[in-house]
Image: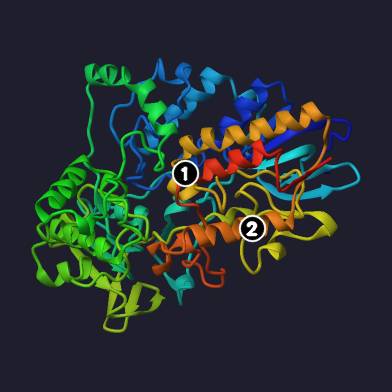
């Protein structure tokens, strides 16, 4: 029988225990709200709890990829510039210990349905174990990578070996030693798995549909003395992070157009960004890389020269770094790599271009393409996520008139400020579609975007209001603003998850706001104008 507490009404229920959910729980509780967090897993961490595939590692460097709260960083040091999953798990345990969060978290609780009850101006929320709660405000913090995507692969069920999606990796792990391993997908998780499998596998086959434009991570491992020294700059770094368009304290593009800069100087700027590693080469060279085809091509050619220098076989090089780019550089999220391109020089690693030789089927022993059979013991599906909207689609949200969110978004996402949805009162989502999400790392967005929600709920409490609705007019204007603001962006030229184009059937549209500071300015303007675009009562 479902458990119920009809006489208890939460002020807010947060769904999801990643960076955004954790920050909301902490701040709302700090402001005196009665708040609880539901997390499907057994610990906090979001993707860093659930993603356990070999090589899982963040692509945003620290200290930017951490909370700016001094009580958290005062007694914490990072061992390396781009932490791995295990260290991030320890960080979340540290956050939990310092902020005392777990007492307000219901773990192993997967939300399956949420229905708005207009007569009471509250949400009724149900979990898979039959637990039901009522809350005035519902705050989904589902992230953009909470629902794995597996494409239709003919004959997949016939494969007799081990097959795992990177997002559903077995807790006991998979030993690649001496195994024939196949990896389908060359996004971030594919790159990381390939780097781990190549040294151990008897044979590794990488099935590539579209080449990834992976960037040099330039990883750094720090001794204890260096860790303490770096902390002296944390406070200033977090201040600069809050003012950055990229959500990084030290990634800033030259204001000039790349094509206007003399070649020797331009190459020096490209080289400096490359040596700094991470996303510096993506977002920290010139301002027009993602708007000017000519400047974009200059960046691509520089990237290609770096990759070609590491690949011995010209045929493989042509597939990994083709002379003509298949999409604009940076229009798909670049992965970070450490040894990815080097492994293709190993005799046990093979690259299969699925555009050249399409996949026909999976069968009992492996993968068959139009030109051959590849027998495998382990198949890794690094095929990504139903980005951003997938997590919402997994929950039966029902708003006014019983209308489902799936119906409301069936022809495309509609939001106001990327936080509210017309017809779904008292629901304020974070790190979702139409906000900076994919262009603003998790902890940064949790604080910058999350504070708007905290202030909004404080305003409603002060007014004695119990309901806030986004108007259809405001949502339409928000979509028009996004379309107009980024109409010249080269993001539109690639079939990426930024454009909701990686999952068949999803309406193609720009899902994320690519400039954090412009986004925050719009949110501030709304609040300063009395929460214009909302109906409050």
How was this image coloured? Answer: rainbow
Q: Which quadrant, please, contains the N terminus? A: top right
Q: x%, y% of residue 519?
A: 52, 45
Which of 433 and 287 lies nearest the eye of the viewer? 287
Which of 120 and 40 lies nearest the eye of the viewer? 120
Task: Give the side of residue 492 with respect to residue 260, left or right.
Answer: right
Q: How many labels does the image show?
A: 2
Q: x%, y% of residue 104?
A: 66, 26
Q: x%, y% of residue 351?
A: 23, 68
Q: Measure the C-alpha gap from mark 2 to mark 1.
A: 19 Å
Residue 448 against residue 55 in the figure, above or below: above
Mark identifier at residue 374: none
Density class for disc 1 (Cα within 10 Å; few <14, some 14-19, many ≥20) is: many
Residue ranking furthest to the right: 119
Task: Give the side of residue 116 with respect to residue 218, left or right.
Answer: right
Query: Mark 2–mark 1 contact, CB under 8 Å?
Result: no
Residue 515 appears anywhere in the view: yes
Density class for disc 2 (Cα within 10 Å; few <14, some 14-19, many ≥20) is: some
Q: Mark 2 points at which residue?
A: 477
Q: Mark 1 points at which residue?
A: 516
Marks 2 and 1, the one that precedes in the sequence: 2
Question: Looking at the image, which residue is at 52% across and 61% down?
Answer: 484
Which of 523 and 139 lies nearest the eye of the viewer? 523
Question: Looking at the image, which residue is at 42% across and 54% down?
Answer: 166
Residue 40 appears anywhere in the view: no
Question: Looking at the image, which residue is at 20% across and 61% down?
Answer: 298
Residue 360 against residue 132 in the figure, above or below: below
Which circle, 2 or 1, is nearer the viewer? 2
Residue 83 against residue 329 in the figure, above or below: above
């Amino acid at each position: 029988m479902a458990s119920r507490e009809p006489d208890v009404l939460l002020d807010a229920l947060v769904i999801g225990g990643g960076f955004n959910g954790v920050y909301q729980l902490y701040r709302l509780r700090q402001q005196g709200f009665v708040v609880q967090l539901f997390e499907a897993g057994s610990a906090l961490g979001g993707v860093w709890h659930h993603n356990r595939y070999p090589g899982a590692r963040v692509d945003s460097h620290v200290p930017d990829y951490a909370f700016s709260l001094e009580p958290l960083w005062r007694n914490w040091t990072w061992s390396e510039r781009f932490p791995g999953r295990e260290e991030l798990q320890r960080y979340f345990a540290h956050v939990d210990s310092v902020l005392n969060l777990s007492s307000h978290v219901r773990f192993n609780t997967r939300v399956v349905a949420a229905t708005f009850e207009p007569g009471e101006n509250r949400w009724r929320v149900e979990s898979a174990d039959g637990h039901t709660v009522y809350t005035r405000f519902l705050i989904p913090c589902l992230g953009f990578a909470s629902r794995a995507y597996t494409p239709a692969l003919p004959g997949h069920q016939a494969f007799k070996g081990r097959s795992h999606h990177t997002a559903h990796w077995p807790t006991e792990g998979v030993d690649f030693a001496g195994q024939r391993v196949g990896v389908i997908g060359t996004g971030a998780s594919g790159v990381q798995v390939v780097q781990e499998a190549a040294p151990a596998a008897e044979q590794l086959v990488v099935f590539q549909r579209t080449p990834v434009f992976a960037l040099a991570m330039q990883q750094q491992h720090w001794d204890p003395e260096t860790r303490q020294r770096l902390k002296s700059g944390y406070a200033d770094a977090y201040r600069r992070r809050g003012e950055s368009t990229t959500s990084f304290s030290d990634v800033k593009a030259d204001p000039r157009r790349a094509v206007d800069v003399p070649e020797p100087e331009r190459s020096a700027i490209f080289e400096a960004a490359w040596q700094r590693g991470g996303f510096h080469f993506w977002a920290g060279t010139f301002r027009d890389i993602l708007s000017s085809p000519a400047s974009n091509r200059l960046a691509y050619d520089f990237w290609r020269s770096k990759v070609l220098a590491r690949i011995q076989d010209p045929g493989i090089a042509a597939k990994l770094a083709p002379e003509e780019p298949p999409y604009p550089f940076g229009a798909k999220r670049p992965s970070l790599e450490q040894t990815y391109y080097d492994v293709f020089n190993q005799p046990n690693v093979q690259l299969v271009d699925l555009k050249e030789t399409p996949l026909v089927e999976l069968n009992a022993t492996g993968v068959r393409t139009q030109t051959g059979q590849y027998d495998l013991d382990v198949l890794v599906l690094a095929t990504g996520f139903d980005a951003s909207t997938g997590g919402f689609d997994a929950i039966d949200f029902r708003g006014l008139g019983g209308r489902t969110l799936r119906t409301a978004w069936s022809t495309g996402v509609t939001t106001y400020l990327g936080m509210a949805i017309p017809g779904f009162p008292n629901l304020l989502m974070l790190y979702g579609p139409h906000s900076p999400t994919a262009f603003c790392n998790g902890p940064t967005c949790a604080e910058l975007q999350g504070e708007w929600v905290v202030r909004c709920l404080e305003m409603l409490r002060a007014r004695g209001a119990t309901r806030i609705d986004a108007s259809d007019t405001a949502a339409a204007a928000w979509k028009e603003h996004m379309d107009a603001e980024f109409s010249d962006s080269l993001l539109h030229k690639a079939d990426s998850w930024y454009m909701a184009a990686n999952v068949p059937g999803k309406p193609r549209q720009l899902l994320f706001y690519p400039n954090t500071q412009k986004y925050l300015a719009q949110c501030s303007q709304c609040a300063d104008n009395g929460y214009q675009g909302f109906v409050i009562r």
